[in-house]
Amino acid sequence: MNYLTVKEVAKKWQITERRVVSLINNGQILGAVKKGGAWQIPSTTLKPDDQRYSFATKQNPKKVVIAGINSEVGVCLAHQLLSEGYEVVGFFQKGSGNTEKLEGLDGAKLVSVDYFDKNSLISACENIESGLDGFVYLEVFFQMEDTVDFDYDLFEKSFKINLFAPNILTRELVKKMDANSSIVIVSSIEAYRGSFGASAYAAAQAAKVNLVQSYSNIFSELYGVRVNSLMTGWIGGYGFDEAFNKTKNKIPLKRLGFPDEVADDIFLLLTRHKYTTGSSLVVDGGYLSVDEQSRSEDLENARFYRYINKFLSESKKGDHIWAVSMLMPNEWNDEPQERKFRQDNIDAAVRGVDVERIFVFDFENQGELSTNKELRRYVQNKYVRSLAVDKKRIEKENPSLLAKVDNGLFAINDDKIFVDYLAENGKSRGYITFNKSLIKTYKEAYNELKNYAVDINSVL
């Protein structure tokens, strides 16, 4: 029998992977088996009927307009709506060239518009029939600005897409809606903060949030339509450019958001929350809640070592310590707390703890590292398994892998992990997490890194 992965089934049934797992856990997918930690589903299995939302049926389909359907969130939302029996009309920027993601949206009606042209937007709305049940605005214009040589046309362009366009579409489409319909306008947490490099974008998001409140005052009373805003934080999934990777350490959930998670929240605002209007739902993994001056997630050096030494001393035979060292400046020196940490590692290994450490460095600099007495002493002891990975090779062959392990990891079994990073204030060393999902992600990256590893003594 042929089996499909959760990802393959989600694509086949046009629902999210999380929804597939939920159906499995509810016993609604017959024949699903777990192999090696991953679900396998018979290819012949039919999609089960969804009993959650009975109001969207083939006999009486609900209709939703998505402006910005060619975004990652837009595609996820469209798939979810289509799988629930909705009719979907998707607007996308004329001539944008970013339409390859739309090829799998069979059943959706796609309409090209010019968000910079008022008449184009009004014309598109005129072609929408009455009885509309939802409208979602996702389109975004974001450009970094040159503060010294400021582009006023760029500033105006940003407002046309981020504020003027949703205003036109909302005011035109609300006329097509019945009572109990819902409008969701996606904004950004930039609305609550100033911006160093995108003042137009941030200002437009702030105006958009206020406009939603005004819409609620007007349209909820006039038409019985709910109008809400969903404010996203850093949504990047597995994207690991420099800014995103730097930011994720400041997010309490310690990861970026995923487009399908945003789509899920939009879906709920469209179909549930019947007494909610004029509200702004923040979807940012806790980013806005962090007090940078006194955040408890970051451990200053003394506490970092105190906690890590405590767990080391409590480790016992059969435990597994796995670590990645990026050889930061605050590591492998002759400071007392570093010496104790290294000795505790060795002592644990002597007690029967399985200790394995991967050192990531530029093999071309091995001569300099060979003179580090503390490092040599550690890697030459017979109890700890020390491996090495060429940083330049990873940067060339698998650059995203380095971002996945941050600036270093230290884990004891699969239930606690310390994550290193270079703090800007020079006082903090990293943070500890017991988040099983996050630890699993780090462990997968660690095992991937091992594929490039060799015995360190063959290099130094």
Image (cartoon, rainbow, N blue to C red):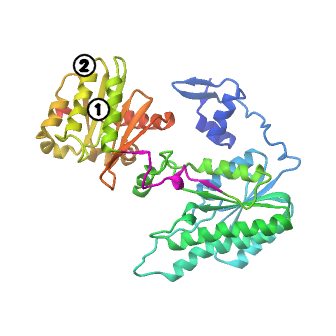
The answer, for residue 152, to whether it is visible in the render is: yes
Left or right of 410? Residue 216 is right
**Magenta highlight on residue 367:** no
What segment is highlighted magenta in the picture? 281-299
Mark 1 falls on what kind of element?
A: strand
Q: For residue 94, which numbered disc appears in the image?
A: none
Which amino acid is tagged 1?
Answer: Arg
Pointer 2 residue: 350
Q: Quadrant of residue 451?
A: top left
Tell me where residue 272 appears, x and y as whole percent. Answer: 77, 49
Which amino acid is tagged 2?
Answer: Val
Q: Is residue 180 above or below residue 380?
A: below
Point out the image quarter for the N terminus. Answer: top right
Tell me where residue 21 appears, x and y as whole percent. Answer: 64, 33
Q: Is residue 358 above or below residue 241?
A: above
Left or right of 53? Residue 22 is left
How far apart, in angstroms, are the residues tagged by discs 2 and 1? 15 Å
Pointer 1 residue: 357
